[in-house]
Image (tube, coloured by chain):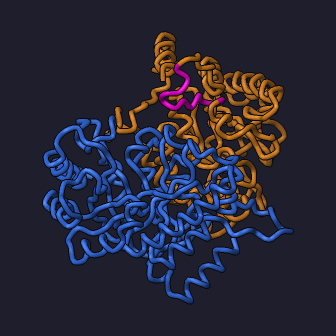
Chain colours: A orange, B blue
Amino acid sequence: MLRRRDFLAAAAATGVAAATGRSHAAQTDAVPAQPKPKAVLKLSAQEGGIPGESLKAKLDTMAGWGFDGIEFGGQAALRRVKEIQSALDGHDVKISALCGGVEGALIADDPAAREKAMHSAKELLTAAGEVGAVGLIIVPAFHRDNMMPHQAARELLTGFARWDARKDKPDPTPVLLELAEHAVKAGTRILLEPLNRQECYFLRTVADGASICKDLDHPGLAVMGDFWHMTWEETSDLGAFITGGGYLHHVHIASRKRRKTPGEDGAADNYVEGFKGLKWIGYQDFVSFECGAVGAREVVMPAAVKLLRAQWEQA
Amino acid sequence: MLRRRDFLAAAAATGVAAATGRSHAAQTDAVPAQPKPKAVLKLSAQEGGIPGESLKAKLDTMAGWGFDGIEFGGQAALRRVKEIQSALDGHDVKISALCGGVEGALIADDPAAREKAMHSAKELLTAAGEVGAVGLIIVPAFHRDNMMPHQAARELLTGFARWDARKDKPDPTPVLLELAEHAVKAGTRILLEPLNRQECYFLRTVADGASICKDLDHPGLAVMGDFWHMTWEETSDLGAFITGGGYLHHVHIASRKRRKTPGEDGAADNYVEGFKGLKWIGYQDFVSFECGAVGAREVVMPAAVKLLRAQWEQA
């Protein structure tokens, strides 16, 4: 794919690609191009439901519960860039990701909704960079978004060229390439989120998200995994995260029966195979709670931190 | 999914499910329900291009080259059931799979083409059982097949119910469930084959095929991997095969640049990560050559056997 080479040349000129430290080994390489760092478990949670009268107070609460990171809703962050920057400045709790907020949908059947989504995604990516987020979580289309035909959607996002296709016409810039370049300039990246079938059809497995990343092979484009969605759509947490590999830059977690705090669904809340996968790939980013709570948060949140750190040791 | 329970009850009554020895651990189980057997490397090749004046002579040639199995085209096998049974009887070289041959397409937009495919697939599955094949390789739709819309195709194949969908209308029997039941009665199974984007759009990753298998969770439905297609579509051979797990029952192999005999593309022909995955899942079935040859087959085929056995040891 020529675009990849074009981008790599451009990225080398700005030093952006080198700064990301990512290795895009060809799929047939048996040995990674660089040694994998030792994986770390950095736990994050979404801002909603954390008690505290100010953002600073919430961060203090999270630090006390044993968290390393905080995740904000995209639209909330957009309105509060300065507040977030100020509260996070020098705090032990760091920002993990921005979650969603794109208006419209990148692969909506309606061109106006697609155009709206491009504008909105760029605005959110800029904010994600300003607050120092690992990335902006993007869902190409929810069920409600009235998606365009599947293959046309993939072609719009990535180009998806059959090798002999489009010889006679110039390739339009794939949507995800345009956004990934914007993301890198903003100092962040896209985090494609596979969901389960209740929420979307287009992207449901980490492997498919990773395959999209491989197509463009751009440091501004990454995939995430969410244990909740994976429970229903994946056959193996271990296989999914190994497949995500160097493209995986964020993880969501919840209990595995009711999407509550990890541990609130008892023995079902086993993440050891997934953690083995994260260790295998030398994962350096956050595992972030996206869930409700049955019990009081000041009880179940620290208990979940303890449970997950114990399962990480087991993995 | 009620149909799963229905099937398991029926299968228990006939003893079919127990005989297959498959374990469908829930995705959240960290420990497999039964110990994995030690994986074996059984090499197979397609009949075409093997020299010999009779099938028996071809089998002798293959044994001399170090092969354990032979794969036949589906339509060829359909016409030659007795000949194949007779030649294989007591021979060291066993049958691996039947490759394709379905007329029409299971998810063609044209209902007549779909009906034709159901009839053809059942006929081929019956033959696959008669010759003792691990399974019949099926591609739901090639590019040429003018596929129905993507989500409708998935719903036709598996049901793909959102949890709250179809409360008020009976679920039609998913196409793959009907075929999988036919397969088990015939003593074989469906092998869904993910292809690369040059050949199809619908099914391109082992993870997606495995996810289809998980939806129906039926001993007559399995997935395969093909190193050739995986080279282009997968991010990790290891991750793909771990994800295939207990659903993976056949593998194709070729050189990784030109689809020739493994080894004919030099250093690109590295299968060690994939073999690690097969070892991880305790793989018991065949790795079968589907490829051309640049050099003389009597030279490159035994050389490939040697190369692959060495890489298996490394894995």
Would you say A221 lies left or right of A108 here? left
In the image, what residue occupies the spot 49% across and 82% down?
B16
| Residue A56 in view of the camera | no
Task: Residue at 73% x, 61% y: name it.
Answer: B161
Q: Quadrant of residue A123?
A: top right
Magenta span contains residue A163:
yes
Task: Estimate the x, y position of residue B268 in percent, counting from the top left.
Answer: 29, 36
Q: Quadrant of residue B97?
A: bottom left
* Residue drawn at x 67%, y 53% as measured from the top left: B153
Front-lying residue, B285 or B78: B78
> Does residue A71 appear in this view?
yes
Q: Residue at x 70, y 74 (%)?
A: B2
Residue B170, percent across and down? 79, 71
In magenta, the rendered stretch is A156-167
Most common SS among magenta residues: loop
Image quarter (top left, top right, bottom left or bottom right) of the N terminus of chain B:
bottom right
Vertical placement of residue B226 versus A86, above or below: below
Q: Is residue A233 left or right of residue A295?
A: left
Q: Nearer the viewer, residue A279 or B116?
A: B116
Seen from the viewer's position, the closer of residues A281 and A72 is: A281
Figure check: A266 above or below A76 = below
Q: Is residue B242 magenta?
A: no
In percent of width and height, residue B216 lies at 61, 67
* View extreme (right): residue: B168
Would you say B9 lies left or right of A110 here? Answer: left
Side of B213 relative to A186 (left or right): left
Between B112 and A85, the one nearer to me in the picture: B112
Identify whether B22 is placed above or below B273: below
Q: Position of residue B8 (x, y in %)?
A: 59, 80
